[in-house]
Image (spheres, helix red, strand yellow):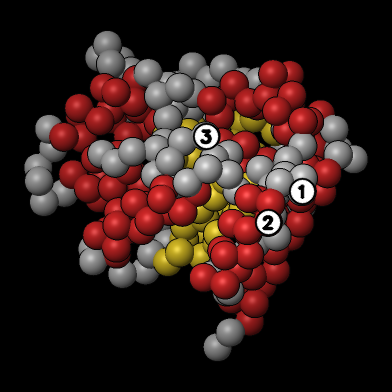
Amino acid sequence: MRIIAVAMAKGGVGKTTTAVNLAHGLALAGQRVLLVDCDTQAQTTTFLGVSPPYGLYEFITGHDGAGQAVLKKEAVHAARKNLWVLAGGIKLVELKNWLGEQARDRRHAILRQSLKPGNQGLDYLIFDCAPGWDVLSVNILMAANEVLCPVALQGPALEGLKTFFGYLVSVQQLNKSLRLRYILPTMFDRRTRQSHDIYHRLRRLFRKQICDPIYHNVRLCEAPVAGRSIFEFAGSASGARDYRKLAERLIDDGIRQEDQP
């Protein structure tokens, strides 16, 4: 199973759009995917139009906050064929407090340990990470082995990437298997010179990690309002084409990894 964190220090770069549409794109290609919402805003489930009764808080702590026990399988919600979600939301504030109260020598690896018994049969586990840096962020990167960074091709795009690299390097000292695998340019506006300039700079800096860009597409903004992925909302739109191409790249990379001795 590949465990991928969709992460960036800066907000508003298309993390949730990427996590949801990548996860559904992989599921549509026959891959079995668990999508984990790690944001207090619960955007992942909103984007998919589902309202699970439980989520990541219950999955990790084993209870609902009121003393009622919750099994891990009860927290995992079937959202689409081949696609399951662990919901985020405001309870993640309580989860961060709970994690902070655990023993110092184990608090950063609790998520990784929680996921181990329940990953049978999955091909991908994708984390939709919140911006910022806290005990849950560390847990996610300790559990992951790959990172996909969406970078919006507008404004001070590289500043957020530089900040995130600082986070990444600090966790790599503890999680030796963690690798930056993908840089995904998002919000590419063909009409602006800035988009082209940032994109070409990223290509020079990250020749191996750079992905084909996600172009600016109004349908990508409209799909979450309908509670649908881009493939369901506008399957022929350029946004669907771009995320389909991203899913295909990940699948192809996985096949190549398996073929290596």
Q: Position of residue 34 (x, y in %)?
A: 55, 43
The residue at which mark 2 appears reads as 196
Q: Which of 80 and 153 is in front in this view?
A: 153
Tell me the kind of residue under disc 1. Arg
Q: Earlier in the sequence, mark 1 or mark 2?
A: 1
The residue at which mark 3 appears reads as 12
Residue at point 63%, 26% (across, down): 47
Tell me the kind of residue under disc 2. His
Give me the disc on residue 70: none
SS category of the residue bearing label 3 = loop
Q: Residue furthest right?
A: 236
Tag 3 near tag 2, CB within 8 Å: no
Q: Distance between the residues labelled 1 and 2?
A: 7 Å
SS category of the residue bearing label 2 = helix
The residue at which mark 1 appears reads as 190
Residue 176 in the figure: left or right of residue 152: left
Residue at point 36%, 47% (across, down): 140
